[in-house]
Image: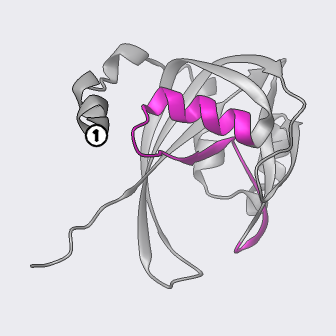
Amino acid sequence: MSEVWKPSVTVAAIIERAGRFLLVEEETSDGIRFNQPAGHLDPNESLMDAVARETLEEAAHDFTPTALVGMYMSRYLSSRTKQEVTYLRFAFCGDLGMEHNRPLDEGILRTVWMTRDEMVACQEKHRSPLVLQCVDDYLAGKRAPLSVIYTHPSVIGELHG
C-alpha cells in the first residue's frame, strides 16, 4: 500500500491596529523571518481555537477570530528535508485582546507592528509570500463569515471516547 499524501494545515492571525499589522520575528531554518502569528493545527482542535492558541503562544495576546480572510495553498521545497511540502493556510482577522506577561514561543524573537509599506520594504525577510498576500486580501476587504467553517462535534468526541 502506498503512503497517503497529507498537506500541512496551518492558521494565521491578520491583526491590524491603526494601519499597522502585528508580526512576529522568528528564527527559521532559512534565518530570521517575519510572519503573522501562525502555526500548525493540532490534533482535536478547531481552526478558530488553533489561531487563538497560536496568537497567545507567539504574540502573548488573546485573539478572537471574527472572519476568515482567505484559504491559501502553497508548495515549498523544504531546505531541511529537500522534499516538497504543501501547506493549506487559513488566515483569520479578528479582535486582539489582553496582552499577557508570558514568554513567547520557542524561536519567536519579538513582536513588531508594521505598515504595509514597511512590510513591502522587507519582503525578502518574510517567512513566505503569503505574509503580504494575506494583508493585501485583508486590506481589499476579503472576509467570509466563520459559519463557512464547520467542525463536526462528534469528531472530537470520537477521538476522546
x%, y% of residue 30?
71, 74
Considering depth in this image, is 59 or 144 the residue closer to the camera? 59
Q: Which quadrant of the figure contains the C terminus?
A: top left
Circle 1 is placed at which residue position?
Answer: 159
Considering depth in this image, is 50 or 79 the residue closer to the camera? 50
32 lies above or below 146 = below
x%, y% of residue 102?
86, 36
Considering depth in this image, is 138 or 38 the residue closer to the camera? 38
Q: Can residue 137 be seen in this view?
A: no
Bin the neighbour count of mark 1 within 10 Å (Cα to Cα): few under 14, some 14-19, many 20 and up. Answer: few
Identity of the residue furthest to the bottom in this view: 82
Q: Which amino acid does label 1 sit on?
A: Leu
The magenta region covers 29-57
Residue 40 within the magenta-colored segment of the rendering: yes
For the point 69% across and 42% down, the residue is 36
Q: Is residue 64 visible?
A: yes
For the point 44% across and 45% down, the residue is 72
Q: Which quadrant of the figure contains the N terminus?
A: bottom left
86 lies above or below 113 = below
Q: Is mark 1 on a helix, strand or loop?
A: helix
Location of residue 134 by image quarter: top right
x%, y% of residue 136?
62, 34
For the point 28% across and 40% down, the residue is 159
23 lies above or below 126 = above
60 lies above or below 65 = below
